[in-house]
Image (tube, rainbow, N blue to C red):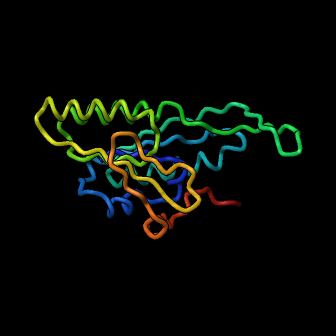
């Protein structure tokens, strides 16, 4: 099982999500996440992700994280004025996820890859995995899981995968009750 922590999954507990997934053993579970910088306004989120990923690692999940990249972004508001803000963007997480899913497929480490992402850049990795399955004369299924609600803008999974919708009831049952933020003094 290979997974990717997208922003929509911040409050979820991965092991709870797996109740709805094909069987997998914890030593084969991997989680990829972009995490905030440890400076300035981003410190609280950095602490959140550092603590959450540490707990996940202790449960046997292989965790990979990379700092988010920050670039000023300007948007035009309805009144015609401009507003500039500093959003964090994941860089390299999708590449790591693609490399891991392909490498693990070559090693015959899984039959089903469950990917919590909708990143269409991963379609090429899926094509490679299907070629590996043919070359190794075996079956590999790649499934994209993602939240779906009436307000969802993106209703597509990764190309050439099966799609597994996470509805509100499943999402709510997987919320992580722990608060990983640092305690305020």
From this view, report whether residue 54 is shown above or below residue 178: above
* Front-most of residues 141 and 105: 141
Q: Position of residue 25 (x, y in %)?
A: 23, 53
- Write the residue at 40% across / 32% down: 96
From this view, report whether residue 148 is shown above or below residue 50: below
Q: Position of residue 4 (x, y in %)?
A: 43, 45
Task: Quarter of the image for the C terminus: give it.
Answer: bottom right
- Write the residue at 40% across / 35% down: 122
Q: Position of residue 140 (x, y in %)?
A: 21, 42
Q: Position of residue 70 (x, y in %)?
A: 66, 33
* Front-most of residues 138 and 71: 138
- Write the residue at 25% across / 45% down: 141
- Write the residue at 32% across / 51% down: 60
From this view, report whether residue 131 is shown above or below residue 169: above
Q: Is residue 43 left or right of residue 132?
A: right
* Front-most of residues 117 and 45: 117
Q: Is residue 53 left or right of residue 7?
A: left
Q: Quadrant of residue 125?
A: top left
């Amino acid at each position: 099982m290979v997974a990717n922590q997208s922003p929509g999954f911040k409050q979820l507990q991965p092991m709870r999500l797996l109740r709805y997934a094909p069987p997998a053993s914890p030593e084969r579970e991997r989680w990829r996440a972009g995490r905030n910088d440890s400076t300035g306004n981003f410190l609280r989120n950095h602490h959140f992700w550092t603590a959450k990923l540490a707990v996940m690692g202790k449960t046997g999940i292989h965790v990979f994280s990379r700092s988010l990249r920050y670039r000023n972004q300007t948007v035009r508001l309805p009144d015609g004025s401009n507003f500039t803000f500093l959003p964090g963007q994941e860089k390299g997480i999708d590449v790591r996820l693609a490399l891991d899913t392909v490498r693990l497929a070559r090693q015959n480490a899984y039959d089903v890859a469950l990917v919590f992402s909708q990143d269409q850049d991963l379609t090429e990795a899926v094509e490679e995995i299907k070629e590996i399955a043919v070359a190794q004369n075996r079956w590999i299924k790649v499934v994209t899981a993602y939240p779906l609600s009436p307000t969802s803008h993106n209703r597509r999974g990764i190309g050439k995968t099966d799609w597994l919708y996470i509805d509100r009831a499943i999402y709510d049952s997987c919320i992580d009750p722990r608060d990983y933020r640092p305690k305020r003094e």
